[in-house]
Amino acid sequence: MRSSDAFVLRRCQILLASSRGERSLQIAENLSCGQQTVSKAIHEFNERGLDALKQGSSRPTEVHATFDEHSARALQQMLHQDPRKFGKDGTFWTLEYAAQVSFE
């Protein structure tokens, strides 16, 4: 409970409150965090024991492509044309222009 690591401290507070029989909603309200955060901490502790006090990577385990090959090719072809052809004022593509035109 004296950890300088905020993640470990919060997890310990959650687990201590849970061991006293407090419900996840009550713990979340007392600690000003989300009920899902509380449930996840308790679940991970039940699954992994003290290893649940080690913060894992926040990096997603699965990555989904935003564009398929066809869409990527269409975007590339669009960016090789003058933005004025698509009703934009500038002569150079900006990220905002590209987003607007590709959405349209």
Image: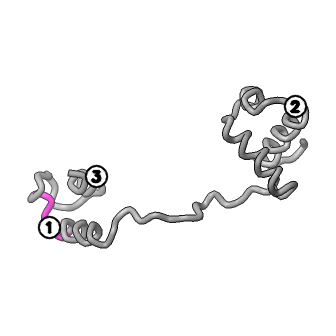
Q: Which mark is residue 12?
A: none
Going by the numbered disc 1, the residue's amino acid type is Gln
Question: At which x and y percent is residue 70?
Answer: 26, 71
Residue 11 sits inside the magenta stretch: no
Write the residue at 79% across / 57% down. 54
Going by the numbered disc 3, the residue's amino acid type is Glu
Q: Which quadrant holds the N terminus?
A: top right
Question: At which x and y percent is residue 74?
Answer: 22, 68
Q: In this view, does 96 lie to the left or right of 39?
A: left
Circle 3 sits on which residue?
96
The magenta-colored residue range is 80-84
Circle 2 sits on which residue?
21
Write the residue at 73% across / 39% down. 38
Q: In this view, does 8 lie to the left or right of 29?
A: right
Dominant secondary structure of the residues highlighted in magenta in the image: loop
Circle 1 sits on which residue?
81
Going by the numbered disc 2, the residue's amino acid type is Gly
